[in-house]
Structure formats: structure tokens, C-alpha cells
Image: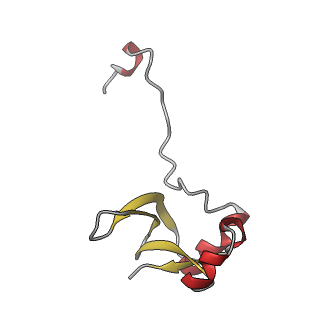
Amino acid sequence: MAGRKQRNRHSISRQFVGDYLGLEHPDRADLMKHVGRQRIVFGYTVNQYNRKFVPCNRDMIVTEGNIFLLGYRPTVDAKTAKKMRPEDIRYETYVET
């Protein structure tokens, strides 16, 4: 950009954060148990598509040594989950392999 940044008034100057998931927040402690004490370089929510092109949200976390794809699944089986209200179903995180 070498000095051209000042010419475009509508552009914004944003610093690179790297943690777009807010992993430091106490609500995200379930994600941090999979990562451990490794330093997080980058974290973002991505869409993963299956064979039928159905998108699923996954949290991608890049540490200094690993890349984690974390998903969410209900703690009860599918048959029981159909009988429950959606707000009553509890979810757990798991590491995608």
C-alpha cells in the first residue's frame, strides 16, 4: 500500500486479531479443553460440506503444532432428541477426525 492508504477515505485500518472465536471468554471453556495449553495462532468458524453438500459449522483452531476442527453433537441419541424441544437439547464439543 506504501502511502496510498491515506487516499482512500472509506477504508478502515484493522489489526489482525487471530482469535475470531473469542476463546478467552469463559463460555468457550469447552473448546479449550481439547486444545490444552498450546498457544492459539488462529481461530475461526468455517463451513464444512459433506458428500451431499450439506453445510455444517465447525470451529477451526490453529495452534503452533496442530489444526483442530471442532464440531458440536447432542448429548442424547437422535431418537430422544426428536422428542425434545430444541432449546432443551444439550450439546458437547468433539474433535473432528
- Residue 42 screen position, x and y as percent: 46, 60
The image quadrant of residue 49 is bottom left
Q: What is the x, y in percent for residue 60?
A: 44, 65
Viewer-side residue, 35 vs 77: 77
In this rendering, would 46 be left or right of 50?
right
The quarter of the picture where the C terminus appears is bottom left
Vertical relation: 57 (above or below) 96: above
16, 49: nearer the viewer: 49
Return the residue nearer the eye: 77 or 15. 77
Given the current orientation, which residue lies at the most extreme front position?
Answer: 83
Task: Give percent across and percent down for residue 61.
Answer: 46, 67
Picture mark count: 0
Where on the picture, by quarter, is residue 46?
Answer: bottom left
- Color encoding of the figure: secondary structure
Quadrant of image for the N terminus: top left
In the depicted view, which residue is nearer to us: 24 or 54? 54
Note whether 10 is above or below 29 in the view shown.
Answer: above
Task: Identify which residue is drawn at 70% across, 65% down.
Answer: 87
Residue 58 drawn above or below residue 68: above
Residue 3: x, y in percent? Answer: 34, 21
- What's the residue at 50%, 40% (across, down)? 15
Left or right: residue 60 versus residue 20 is: left
Q: Quadrant of residue 30?
A: bottom right
The residue positioned 61% from the left and 78% from the top of the image is 81
Q: Residue at x 47, y 26 (%)?
A: 12
